Image (cartoon, rainbow, N blue to C red):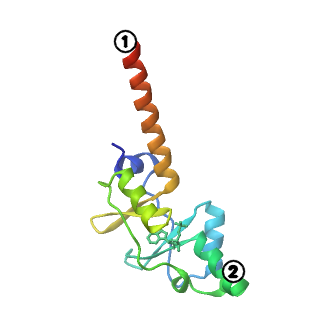
Amino acid sequence: MVTVASILAIKGNAVLTIAPHRTMREAVEMLAERGVGALVVTGVDGAVLGILSERDAVRVLASEGARMLDSTVARIMTSRVKTCTPFDTADDVMEMMTAGRFRHVPVMEGGKLSGIVSIGDVVKHRLAAFESEHQAMREYIATA
Ligand code: AMP
């Protein structure tokens, strides 16, 4: 079974974070430069205050135009963040993403942010699991 812990063991625990008082200009620069789809918004104590994805940036750009770049991240982010734990499975996270229509889930361990899983990570690991099951089945059939 593919768990969030096994995904993080390969991709690592790094999470790109941004403070809520930062500007959207800084946020979009970070999204572009680092090639990620979302930033976790954290307070000084490291608490998760929200999540800001490229979709949020596009939405406010469409409704407010380029002046949104001077807005704070706090005004644009989603504050009710759905998180998972390392013990959740890839299927649990996929269900969460499908039900909530988002593609990023921060991982919390002992109340602390300890990683992030994207839909790309989940799909990649599930495909790898399918491949190895398929291979094992083929080997079994060949020896039966
Ligand atoms: P995404 O598909 O991740 O680009 O996000 C789509 C929308 O869902 C954006 O408004 C995000 O701020 C929001 N969002 C992304 N991840 C989460 C999450 N884990 N919990 C709640 N909202 C989220």
Q: Residue at x 50, y 56 (%)?
A: 119
Residue farthest right in this picture:
66
SS category of the residue bearing label 1: helix
Name the one closer to the observer, 129 or 141. 141
Name the one closer to the observer, 141 or 49. 141
SS category of the residue bearing label 2: helix
Proximity of marks 2 and 1: CB atoms separated by less than 8 Å: no
Mark 2 and mark 1: span between their CA atoms?
Answer: 60 Å
Q: Earlier in the sequence, mark 2 or mark 1?
A: 2
Q: Residue at x 67, y 85 (%)?
A: 63
Q: Quadrant of the C terminus?
A: top left
Q: Position of residue 55 (x, y in %)?
A: 60, 71
Label drawn at residue 143? 1
Q: Position of residue 98 (x, y in %)?
A: 45, 61
Residue type at the position of mark 2: Ala
Q: Position of residue 80 (x, y in %)?
A: 41, 78
Q: Is residue 91 above or below residue 134?
A: below
Residue type at the position of mark 1: Thr
Q: Is residue 9 above or below residue 21?
A: above
Quarter location, residue 87: bottom left
Q: Circle 1: is it few (<14), some (14-19), or many (20+) Cα within 10 Å?
A: few
Q: Is residue 129 above or below residue 81?
A: above
Q: Circle 2: is it few (<14), some (14-19), or many (20+) Cα within 10 Å?
A: few
Residue farthest left in this picture:
110
Q: Residue at x 62, y 80 (%)?
A: 24
**CB at disc 1 and ligand 1 closer than 8 Å:** no
Residue farthest top in this picture:
143
Instruction: Please give the residue where the numbered disc 2 appears in the rendered image.
Output: 62
Q: Position of residue 64 (x, y in %)?
A: 68, 87
What is the tally of numbered marks visible in this picture?
Answer: 2
Q: Residue at x 33, y 42 (%)?
A: 1
